Image (cartoon, helix red, strand yellow):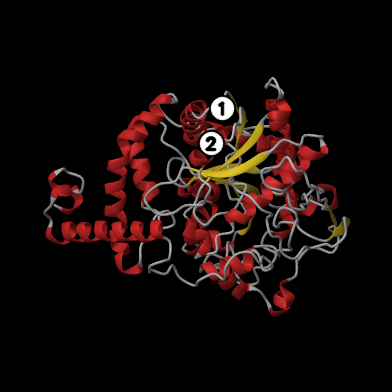
Amino acid sequence: MRSGRIQSSASCSASSSSTFPHPPCLSSASRHCKFPRLLSPRALSLSQRVSRNCLVPETSQFSFSKQSSTNKKRLFPVNVGALVTSNTEAISTGPLVDEEKIGVLLLNLGGPETLDDVQPFLFNLFADPDIIRLPRLFRFLQKPLAQFISVLRAPKSKEGYASIGGGSPLRRITDDQAEELRKSLWAKDVPAKVYVGMRYWHPFTEEAIEQIKKDGITKLVVLPLYPQFSISTSGSSLRLLESIFRDDEYLVNMQHTVIPSWYQREGYIKSMANLIEKELQKFDRPEKVVIFFSAHGVPLAYVEEAGDPYKAEMEECVDLIIEELEKRKITNAYTLAYQSRVGPVEWLKPYTDDTIVDLGRKGVKGLLAVPISFVSEHIETLEEIDVEYKELALESGIQNWGRVPALGCEPMFISDLADAVIESLPYVGAMAVSNLEARQSLVPLGSVEELLATYDSQRRELPAPVTVWEWGWTKSAETWNGRAAMLAVLVLLLLEVTTGEGFLHQWGILPLFH
């Protein structure tokens, strides 16, 4: 269970309430100031690089509030926080929509729609170098390793998908979100088209891009449906987009911008608080229920070695939701843990299953699970949380279990996403001054160092990022053992690939190398 206070870095504002020129769709407001993440530092002009200040039109003004609170009931204390509030009225969208064709590209993970899709979906997932990061020397084994893992995991994964109806509902829900977002944008006088691009299953990002080109879109806002940024989720999708844009003359000349994370937006925070408040009322004694935020985990090395901001953004997100609940006189104890770890390496802790068992031992009787990193129902919510973790909770002595639904098409949430898109329009292509720079301007993902420097120049609690993913031993025994096991697997795969013989070929797992 997490304890202690989240350490904050330099704040954008020292006052309890202030007005600061800042693009809310592009940056976080609560503890630090970020400049718009439209392009990598090398593509900024000299004047744009000065002090890495927030770059906004002089006419834009956005309000922030900052409140602190201490409550002894909490399992960990809340830090100060601030919401990014919508202010679409401050931006004149007339010139942006009259002569341009505006598109919004929603990015998501994707999921198998039938049981036959499960193994190829898993292959696409594990073939992504942002999911399994191999040393440069062994990168040629990425696809053979993905094939091996996907075949190995497919039977268990099929059982999970079978238990929720035979496939993932993620595509249907994302399509619904896209349609509701389109309606909301049109209602706000922004006649945009909304597209869905999945990373690992249909409709693939490449398919969405082809449709965007056919429709002649001239201004594109890229919106990952992950509230918090991670190298392995938003980062992977954006890296793919960057490679697609780099090789296509039409896309290079199309103005675009990215909203990398939006967990601090008022509509998202209030929508989450609304759902939590509603579910708490279903318990006999709502005030005694522990609010259990369960986030999708990432390997610990992503945070400690590669500088992934995911953990810090997740903690800040929880702080903001708790702060909103406090305003409503809801002061329940709460905690944050991480689920869905895979493989022998160490992931972000505390783990969800371990934390549930620990809460049961401490006498907690009521638990409300909150899938904090998911905005759509899929396998991690419908099977992992609703089935596996619920059973574990009941076995651990927790008598009353509840779960907050994913946001889906909550009207306030969708409306706020539309506001985020509208607020980002003044920045679409604003800093691309040449085709060369345009080729680099989608996202600063040329290296982890650039990503972190551009993503958040003020964050202090993350270690200094490394330029490349380094291979080596660490002091963590779990990581040490995991890497030793991975090395052994890689050696076996290398022998299989080079000799064309071995048990993987005998089982038909590596037919491509016969």
User: What residue is disc 2 on?
Assistant: 356
In this view, the residue in front, 293 or 13, is: 293
The residue at the point 43 percent across, 61 percent down is: 476
In this view, the residue in front, 89 or 32, is: 32
Quadrant showing the N terminus:
top right
Mark 1: give few (<14), some (14-19) or many (20+) Cα within 10 Å.
many
Label 1: element kind: loop
The residue at the point 31 percent across, 69 percent down is: 137
Q: Earlier in the sequence, mark 2 or mark 1?
A: 2
**Residue 63 on image: x %, y %:** 85, 53
How many numbered marks does the figure carry?
A: 2
In this view, the residue in front, 426 or 141, is: 141
Label 2: element kind: helix
Q: Is residue 112 left or right of residue 216?
A: left
The answer to whether any part of residue 499 appears in the image is yes
Which label was assigned to residue 204?
none
Answer yes or no: do the residues labelled 2 and 1 have beta carbons within 8 Å?
yes
Q: Identity of the amino acid at label 1?
A: Ile
Q: Identity of the amino acid at label 2?
A: Ile
User: What residue is disc 1 on?
Assistant: 398
Task: Give the alpha-carbon distance from disc 2 to disc 1, as whole Å.
Answer: 9 Å
Q: Is residue 112 left or right of residue 55?
A: left
Q: Is residue 240 left or right of residue 431?
A: left
The residue at the point 43 percent across, 23 percent down is: 165
**Residue 276 on image: x %, y %:** 69, 32
Position of residue 351 relative to residue 54, above or below, is above
The answer to whether any part of residue 114 appears in the image is no
The residue at the point 29 percent across, 53 percent down is: 145
**Residue 438 on image: x %, y %:** 59, 67
Specify the farthest residue to the front.
362
